Image: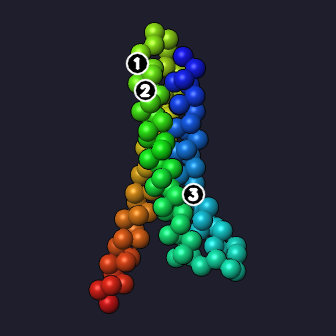
Amino acid sequence: MRSNRAAARAAVLLGALAVLAIPGGVLAAQLSSQLRLLETLYIVVAAACVLGLAAVYAARRARLNAARTLSAAGGVGFARAVAWAGAYAGVTGALALAVYGILRWAQ
């Protein structure tokens, strides 16, 4: 019973970090004179992708653990939603950087 709650909490935490990674990187680049926006985005988008995929894995593990128990699966649906939002943010950022790279290459 504790394992699905722990996995759900991990999924929520990782998903929230993935969602907040890109805006946090942009804010850090805006506030710092030493960071450039594009180089910062390369790092935070990759981090968001990794965190999002880890969150989806943790949410899947929580769902599978909840399916094996007889107790109520509290928070698994919310964990899945936050995990997929994190994965979506990471993939969307990666696609944006890919389109930017293609446009730069085509010039």
What number is the disc on residue 63? 2
* Residue 1, horizontal then vertical, whole percent: 54, 16
Which residue type does callout 3 highlight? Ala
Q: CA distance from mark 3 to mark 2?
A: 25 Å
Vertical relation: 86 (above or below) 30: above
Name the residue tied to disc 1. Answer: 67
Instruction: Look at 54% across and 63% down and name the residue there.
Output: 44
Is residue 86 at all visible to an observer of this figure?
no
Choose the circle earlier in sequence order: 3 or 2. Answer: 3
Q: CA distance from mark 1 to mark 2?
A: 6 Å
Q: Between residues 82 and 67, which one lies in front from this camera angle?
A: 67
Query: Which element is circle 3 on?
Result: helix
From the viewer's perspective, tell me whether residue 52 is left or right of residue 30. left
Q: CA distance from mark 1 to mark 3?
A: 31 Å
Instruction: Look at 50% across and 69% down and name the residue there.
Output: 42
Report the residue that reaches farthest toward the bottom: 107
